[in-house]
Image (cartoon, grey):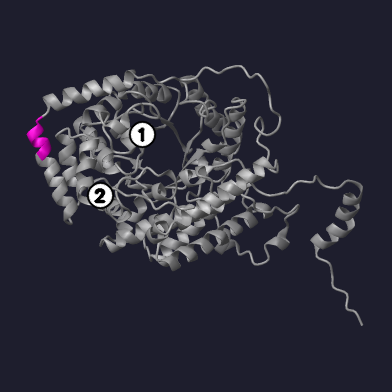
Amino acid sequence: MKTATADTGKQRWEREVLEPTLKKAPERPVPFTTISGRPIERLYTAEDLPDFDYAADLNNPGEFPYTRGIHPTGYRGKLWTMRQFAGFGTPEETNERYKTLLAAGGTGLSVAFDLPTLMGRDPDHELSLGEVGKCGVNVTSLADMERLFDGIDLGGITTSMTINSPAPMIFAMYLAVAEKQGADWKKLSGTIQNDILKEFIAQKEYIFPPRESMRLITDIFAFCAKEVPKWNTISVSGYHIREAGSTSVQELAFTLRDGIEYVQYGIDAGLDVDAFAPQISFFFNSHSDFFEEIAKFRAARKLWAEVMRDRFKAQNERSWKLRFHTQTAGVSLTAQQPYNNVVRTALQALAAVLGGTNSLHTNSLDEALALPTAEAATLALRTQQIIAAESGVTNMVDPLGGSYFVEKLTLDMERGAKEYFETIDRMGGMVEAVEQGYPQKEIAEASYRFQQSVERREKIIVGVNDYVQEDEPPMKILYIDDTASEKQLGRLADLKKTRDNGKVQRTLDALRQAAGGRENTMYPLLDCVRAYATVGEMCDALREVWGEYEEVPLI
């Protein structure tokens, strides 16, 4: 005798409503997946969340695990910081751009450095040829940092600096400028990216071997806990991991696992977790799959809160709260039909806001072609301002909270990230995983799969593999000529003639000695900077002690 089983609401709908409709009008013959390849069901209901616990999985804004946000009032209390990433040519040119952005309503600064600075090379190094000032501003010595922030009160604005291997040197220069302005280090606020693990994983702008690089980071943790307590000592960056081709869950997992590694190294260096963890911030990509990105941001807060409370036993609630900056996806921008990038950026920025970002940079429409013009950068800032002032999304906290689809995506993101955590833990940690090439291989394979889906036209990129337009009119772009290089080379030559070179050598010798021992390297670096030692000279001093890292190629 058969026993009838009652249909669920979803099963009844599928039988009575969906099936007759599909017989008359089948769905489009395309794979319904996120941009990361995650399958998406046609309908989500309460049945997709059978064990959902409001208090444990979601809870109210400002309450553990902060899925809905770390602030009870969301953007009703304070809007996100509108921090436009900028830098090109000479320090004076970038200084002018900063003042333009601030006058247009920007509320924070973000410094883009050129490749020689990022790699710890001076303009007169042979590897700097043709690169000075091209992809960011060139900063060689304290004199350049003084020019970069001329007329800008560092005590009254927050600054983010995107630099990693030479992060301690650049940070020391910033502190020296603030010191000259009379600013109190205890009140300085801002962020140094300082995330070397993602360099080994994705961006490849590393100098020193992994373990020595981690030493520099823990030195900054200890230094700032004592000297610059409001400064974010690190911005653990998933942005470049995603730009290298990772999926959203890989970005989430590898970024947070990098953060776990930094915390563990800080503890192993003898630091109290609650003395430095509140100064750790994060940096995520906001890509084009609207709901997937929102779910990623929400899952990130929950995962980090649980890790800090349960894994590291942090007692300070500030240690549990994940704060993050977001940048819209540069890799999604196209050189074809570049005005389409305005729409892409707006949607990506809206996803970041709905996900609760604390700070945001919106890419400019011309960035697939060159560094942005002032007009394009202003329009990108206006995009944020329109979302803030005109869209209505800032009126309530976590507007999509409770959506069956968003909550299921958030839980799926969390579970996927935890699986990666377990794999990396079994390897011994993120440094060991990087040395084995594990995250690099995972990202390379994900990037390949996505490119295949584009070439098969399973994923459409408007203007690239569909809706193509021939004979597009040329766009005016910002061109950086060799004037910046010539000027910086001349200044470097003059600096070496006018500074006290004996003092420079003494401070570099002290830096070498500290690197070979256990002294905190930030203090001798500050002495080097005040003596006007260059970025290249300071990095070379550490190269002499620690050597340079060479990655083992993976096929």
| Foreground: disc 1 or disc 2 | 2
Q: Tell me the crowding category of disc 1: few under 14, some 14 to 19, or many 20 or more residues within 10 angstroms, Cα based.
A: many
Viewer-side residue, 142 vs 156: 142
Identify the residue under disc 2: 547
The residue furthest left is 502
Question: Of helix, strand and loop, which mostly describes the magenta segment?
Answer: helix
Viewer-side residue, 154 vs 448: 448
Q: Amino acid at mark 2?
A: Gly
Q: Position of residue 193 (x, y in %)?
A: 37, 43
Is 255 situated left or right of 46 in this image? left
Q: Quadrant of the N terminus?
A: bottom right
Instruction: Give yes or no for contact between labels 1 and 2 (Cβ–Cβ under 8 Å).
Output: no
From this view, report whether residue 105 is shown above or below residue 241. above
Q: Position of residue 491 (x, y in %)?
A: 22, 22
Is 472 situated left or right of 300 in this image? right
Q: What residue is at 87 percent from the left and 59 percent from the top?
A: 15
Q: Which residues are magenta?
A: 500-505
> What SS does tag 1 mark?
helix
- Rounded to the nearest angstrom, the CA distance separating label 1 from label 2 is 20 Å
Q: Which mark is residue 115?
A: 1
Q: Position of residue 414 (x, y in %)?
A: 55, 59
Is 135 situated left or right of 496 in this image? right
